[in-house]
């Protein structure tokens, strides 16, 4: 269930927005002032916030800055009567994702809400597909860093490519020739022991027993 917090002190507008969003399948909380809004959003269950700027307590822009400073990451759409360019700029600078002025049509608000939520899903999906995880190992393909049980371990370029090869084929026996081709290309003679040397390096970094030697065949990463 997607949970949206509507920060709005005008009861009529809050009710209008809430009714529309509920009928589109969202779960809604309403906060009428910045203290309430702050408490609800830092609870960690909010997927998106619709924020009015003129609210009792701290101003909406201050609240926005404060929430971002405290690590609140969900998208925030400002919905306000203030149409001054300076307010818009301040809003975006303090961490808003979108800015809509009143009066507004609900249909447009809904489209913007959905667009923001879609961006979040895409970003989460992308960051997931940049990670390979097997057992205690997590390899980040963008930063090229390995985590073993949450600890960050640096890898050389060859070690990284070898680690990636193992993590893409867990529980599969990889022959020396396969590893040599994948990681080193054809730069090395088949008789070279470079694979064994680097598997030795990785074993130390992965921790005990994760890379098995399969006699006469090659190596296997145990899942
Ligand atoms: Ca207001």
Image: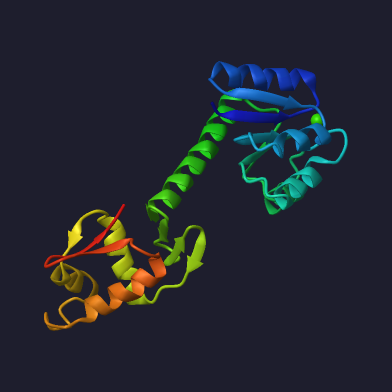
Image location of residue 9, percent across then percent down: 81, 26
Q: Would residue 81 be visible to someone looking at this image?
A: no
Image location of residue 72, percent across then percent down: 67, 45
Residue ID at (70%, 36%) = 43
Q: Nearer the viewer, residue 222 or 76?
A: 222
Image location of residue 29, percent across then percent down: 69, 25
Residue ID at (77%, 48%) = 66
Q: Would residue 222 be visible to someone looking at this image?
A: yes
Left or right, residue 8 beside residue 170: right
The quadrant in which the N terminus is found is top right
Can you tell which quarter of the image residue 143 is in?
A: bottom left
Left or right, residue 185 beside residue 141: left
Residue ID at (62%, 45%) = 97
Residue ID at (51%, 42%) = 120
83 versus 102 height, above or below = below
Q: How is the image coloured?
A: rainbow
How many numbered discs sit on the rendered protein?
0
83 versus 143 height, above or below = above
Can you tell which quarter of the image residue 210 is in?
A: bottom left
Image location of residue 148, percent across then percent down: 45, 61
Seen from this angle, which residue lies furthest right? 57
Left or right, residue 189 beside residue 97: left
Left or right, residue 203 beside residue 37: left
Q: Where does ligand 1 appear, by image quarter?
A: top right
């Amino acid at each position: 269930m997607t949970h949206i917090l509507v920060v709005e002190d005008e009861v009529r507008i809050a009710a209008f927005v809430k009714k529309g969003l509920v009928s589109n399948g969202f779960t809604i909380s309403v906060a009428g002032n910045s203290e309430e809004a702050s408490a609800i959003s830092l609870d960690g269950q909010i997927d998106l916030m619709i924020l009015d700027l003129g609210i009792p307590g701290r101003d909406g822009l201050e609240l926005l800055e404060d929430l971002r400073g405290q690590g609140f990451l969900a998208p925030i759409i400002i919905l306000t009567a203030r149409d001054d360019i300076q307010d818009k700029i301040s809003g975006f600078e303090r961490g808003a994702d979108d800015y809509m002025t009143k009066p507004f049509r609900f249909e447009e608000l809904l489209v913007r809400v959905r667009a923001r939520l879609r961006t979040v899903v895409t970003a989460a999906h992308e960051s997931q597909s940049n990670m390979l995880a097997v057992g205690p190992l997590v390899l980040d393909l963008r930063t090229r860093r390995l985590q073993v049980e949450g600890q960050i371990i640096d890898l050389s370029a060859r070690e990284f490519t070898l680690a990636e090869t193992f993590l893409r084929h867990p529980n599969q026996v990889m022959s020396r020739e396969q590893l040599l081709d994948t990681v080193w290309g054809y730069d090395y003679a088949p008789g070279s022991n470079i694979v064994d040397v680097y598997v030795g390096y990785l074993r130390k970094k992965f921790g005990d027993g994760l890379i098995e030697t399969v006699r006469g065949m090659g190596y296997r990463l145990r899942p």
